[in-house]
Amino acid sequence: MTTLTRTAQAQWNGDLKSGNGHINASSHILNDTPYTFSTRFEDTPGTNPEELLASSHAACYTMALAHTLAEKGYKAESLQTQAFCSLVQFLMPCVKM
């Protein structure tokens, strides 16, 4: 089996609440994509780690379902998956929010 490696980088500048960061992916689809405290923990438009996790799970599941259906002799015309990633208040001894 071929091993595929995908990479992404994240950079953060400043402190948690007033700082900002950028995300990059090896595909260049995410290219200096900004993220901040408010895009993650509030309703400010922009991306966040949880949104990226949910979208990757939805995409992976949908592709796997299409493959499974094809193996069973069915052809999917269109599949749509909605994934949720909830951010529950958590405790990190070194971070006070």
Image (tube, rainbow, N blue to C red):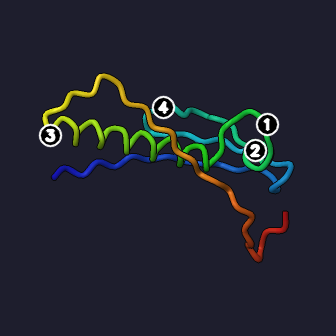
Residues at marks 1 and 3, CA–CA distance in whole angstroms: 42 Å
Q: Earlier in the sequence, mark 4 or mark 3?
A: 4
Q: Earlier in the sequence, mark 1 or mark 2?
A: 2
Q: Earlier in the sequence, mark 4 or mark 2?
A: 4
Give the labeled residue for mark 2: 36
Give the labeled residue for mark 1: 44
Q: Earlier in the sequence, mark 1 or mark 3?
A: 1
Q: Which mark is residue 11?
A: none
Q: Is residue 62 left or right of residue 47?
A: left
Residue in the picture at 30% in, 22% down = 77
Residues at marks 4 and 1, CA–CA distance in whole angstroms: 23 Å
Residue in the picture at 61% in, 49% down = 49
Give the labeled residue for mark 4: 28
Give the labeled residue for mark 3: 71
Residues at marks 4 and 3, CA–CA distance in whole angstroms: 32 Å
Look at the image and tell me in which quarter the C terminus lies: bottom right
Residue 24: give x, y in percent of width and height: 55, 40
**Mark 4 falls on what kind of element?**
loop
Residue mark closest to the camera, 1 vs 3: 3
Could you say which is closer to the camera, residue 40 or residue 19?
A: 40
Q: Amino acid at mark 1?
A: Thr
